[in-house]
Amino acid sequence: MYCEQSKTYLRVPQSGVVLDSRSYLSVVDRVIHKYGSDRSKLINMLQEIQREFQHLPRQALEILSVKLGISLSEIINVATFYHQFRLEPVGVYIIQVCFGTTCYLKGSSEIYESMRKVLGLRERENTAREGTITVEKARCFGCCSLAPVIMVTSSDGSERYVHGRLNVSESKRVVLDYKSRALMKLKGLKNG
Amino acid sequence: MGEALDLGAGVQKISEFVVRVPLASCTLAAGADKVLESIKKALGKLGLDARVKKTGCMGLCYLDPWIELESSGLPPAIYANVKPDQVERIIRRYVEGDLSDALAVRGEANGFKGVPSLNSLPEWRLQVRYVSRNCGFIDPESIEDYLRTGGYSGLRKALKLGKEEVIKVVRKSGLRGRGGAGFPTWYKWRIAYEQRSDIKYVICNGDEGDPGAFMNRLLAESDPHRVLEGLIIAGYAIGASKGYIFVRAEKPLMADRLEVAVRQARDYGFLGEKILGTNFSFDVEVYRSAGAFVCGEETALIAAIEGRSRTRQRPPYPATSGLWGKPTVINNVETLAHVATIFQTGLEEFTKYGTERSKGTKMFCVTGSVKKTGVYEVPIGTRIRTLVYELAGGLPDGRSVKAVQVGGPSGGCIPADLLDLELDYETLQSYGAIMGSGGLVVIDDTNCMVDVAKYFITFTLAESCGKCLPCRVGVKILGDILEKVTSGTATIEDLEILRELGEGIMKSSLCALGGTAPNPVLSTLRYFKNEYEEHVVMRRCPAKVCSRLVTYEINPVRCRGCGQCAKNCPASAISGQPGKAFKIDTSRCTKCGQCLITCPFGAVVKV
Amino acid sequence: MVKVYVNNDEVEVPQEALVIDAIEKAGYEVPTLCYLKGLFNEATCRICVVKVNGKVVPSCRFPVSEGARIIVHDSELIRLRKINLELLLATHEIKCWSCVRKGMCELLSLSKRLGVEGLPVCSECPLQGRSCLVLRGFPCLGPLTVAGCDAECPRRGSPCIGCRGYITSEDVWVRALEEFYKDNVSLNELKSLISFFWSYLPQNLHRLVREVSNVEY
């Protein structure tokens, strides 16, 4: 789909929902209106944009760069430096596997690998192709007594679950459970 | 408020019944919200009029989720690991005077009806709850609670003294930064105070990037006003007009509670124009950062607030030229809590603990292979052994201690035979570790020390800002060599390169991230050389962790013959008949570990 | 004005001067790489490290202070500079034969100064562009030979015969051999040249030559 405003072709996010340029533009405008054209508020602005789209769409960053008057590479510098920011769209559920020291010592690395395997994720791929689940490594949650811990959030932010004291076989069951819930949600979306 | 209700036989008359429910990130993760719901239901069902009070967490994480019941006539009782379906029974029994389900009671020196007093438990008795005194007891979102415990009396006292006098008090206390470096707090304040500038800043560093350290979060979620009070005192001392509290966006509850505290402080006149009738005007903003470990470093933290990224070579130091070029003092959450408490309760109370060179107490997070994971506040100079065995309950049955990692990714491993070392800045440094933010991770015999070093290097490499050569390239090469060691392709010379390169990186890095990154490698090399050599020379991992250096076998008893392992084996090294036990051909096995991950029955084992 | 001591020589500099200015004034020279006077001194390369009162600091950025004792060179500083240069070379794609900096390479002069081996003869060869013997298809061993002779043989139009010894870095060999192969240099001729001075090659390099030529070495 060609976007007249930003003169680019829009990439379709994996969830199958197509966004048009108007929503990127209106969100960026809203954010700039809130913070002013203050370059020092860049991180806050990116956080708001991510809250809206669950990731930082390239088109939104391009529009932001034009409106703020700073180069796109400067924005991408900041966006790739901080962990909170995602540049790729996410699935319906985001599973974050804690890679803190205690969780790692208790096997979170194996849990991470087995989840990726269950979902059939290739190297450098973090989200299942149908757009159901994203699996990420996370920094320490601070719940070390429940190690190994994973945190599952829905991409719209409405749900949050913590699963502690996991092992490999249970983690496989958990990921399949969320996958089927995600599929149901996606079906519901398609049917409107 | 509670009124006496007649519930029939055996019910005591209660004038005020309080149910304390700790709601902090750790307890919520353990299900405290569900417990809260069932408490409300149970109270309704039992017809009890009780005040349900939210509190912070007292730091004994292995008890999560816990609750506390208190009514007049009965001692406050703490119940541990509470499940929603147990709540009704617990409450009913408590009001009937039956405390048998409780873990401990507060206040009663000899316990109550067989339930021990909290003070008799070593994990409580051996602590000195100096800054954590209110944690788990007061409502973190109630400034009234804080005021009742002496809150903001420190600020009042400080405002009456001059700025110079305040700095002198901090100097006399000997308070050292609790964030890691242990820099004398008064010195930073003095330099900033002496700068001539109409605008100055103070920043509370709540980044807490060390994995396995959550004492700042716990303190800020349980007693946020204490931190705020310290920040205001710091602002007054150096002549700042604005303060920031730097929190990670990944810790939303911590940021929320601090924001509530700031709003309440404004309402009560502790922030804003002409505070408490003086000429001092000061306000605070809570800044939610987007998450980067290097933001624990002062110049990177300043860059984040300025909307940029990356560190800057010091000098100039932030105290002379920091946020937007103005004099800036950055202090850790715990340091500021100490400041507030020192002014509230006096110098003696603080200096009577600790060692000659490091006065006072410190909150230590003990995690890893221990029975009682938690945050324990003890005097500086306490032995590691005391923390691990007497407070944290020692290791689980069947495990033996191998090392204790002190100081996170910037720290080092203290081996088992050195556990009698004292936890103070200088001692730890001379043995290859650092105090850091106070995180202790207990490593047992099922972990491989080379793997631990590799884990920390992987972490530091991912967090490196990439500006200077030694960290960007050097740490990566350390990681590459460790990868070689754990996959059996390294040589003895590689171990020498590790040491030489590590020392070179430490000396020439731009900031402390690179400067301390080689610590885990150098300390494990120092104390566990033979484990490294076994990896390199014998191509064997004694802890059976490094997947390429162990032998994989299928346990015929557990194998169901499903064939999943064979299907997923990239080397086609597994064979068998459906329904019968499969077998791995070790000569073809590439030790990738896929079969172990794939097997649904846990039949693949490492030997 | 403040007084500082550079290698025990007393020198007076303005208060706001940097250590590197003091070193310059005293007549010494400290190697640098990323430093551009007046433009860039973010201290990212760590090559300009010196000791001020015993502490290792980047001279391009550290300010002077009254009575500061500055040491420009000692064994530890040289070792640190060497390590950092080696780290830089490790991430540097060495293709000196087609590099625009051939003959005027900063990395080469720094390597020579610090005694770091890693760059081939091509990095100091005066033949540039189309007159490069390798790019013209001659079996010049420049890409495989250690720099240091100021490329004497190629300077006179004669292909390098490798008398200074071979480069040890495998990835340079891979790229060089690919280059030779591309220019249809006869690999037999190449191998006979190699065996002239380097009758003993380590195993890994044996393997590489064998892989490219498919013939037993």
Image (spheres, coloured by chain):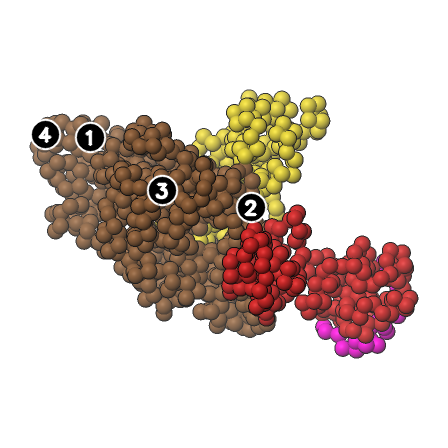
Give the structural element (helix, strand or loop) at label 4: loop
Check residue B438 in the rendering and tell me which mark sits there, or answer none. none
Which one of the lettered chains is coloured red?
Answer: C
Q: Are marks 3 and 4 in contact (CB under 8 Å)?
A: no
Closer to the chain start, of discs 2 and 4, is 4
Q: Amino acid at mark 3?
A: Ala
Answer few, some or many: residues within 10 Å of disc 1's Cα (few below 14, many 20 plus, some between 14 and 19).
Answer: many
Which one of the lettered chains is coloured brown?
Answer: B
Check residue B237 in the rendering and tell me which mark sits there, or answer none. 3
The spot of residue B316 in percent (x, y) is 52, 49
Q: Work out how far the residue at label 2 is from the one at label 3, CA to CA, in angstroms.
A: 29 Å
Closer to the chain start, of discs 3 and 4, is 4
Label 2 vs label 3, nearer the camera: 3
Q: Are marks 1 and 2 in contact (CB under 8 Å)?
A: no
Is residue B571 one of those drawn in magenta?
no
What residue sits 61% from the left and 37% below the top?
Answer: A75
Closer to the chain start, of discs 2 and 3, is 3
- Tell me the quarter of the image containing the N terminus of chain B: top left
The spot of residue B202 in percent (x, y) is 42, 41
Q: Amino acid at mark 1?
A: Ala
Check residue B8 in the rendering and tell me which mark sits there, or answer none. 4
**Chain that bears disc 1:** B
Give the structural element (helix, strand or loop) at label 2: loop
Residue A113 seen in the current view: no
Label 1 vs label 4, nearer the camera: 1
What residue sits 24% from the left and 56% below the top?
Answer: B352
**Same-chain check, marks 3 and 4:** yes
Q: Amino acid at mark 4?
A: Gly
Say which residue label 2 marks. Answer: B310
Question: Which is more toward the observer, C216 or B181?
Answer: B181
Q: Work out how far the residue at label 1 is from the one at label 3, CA to CA, in angstroms.
A: 44 Å
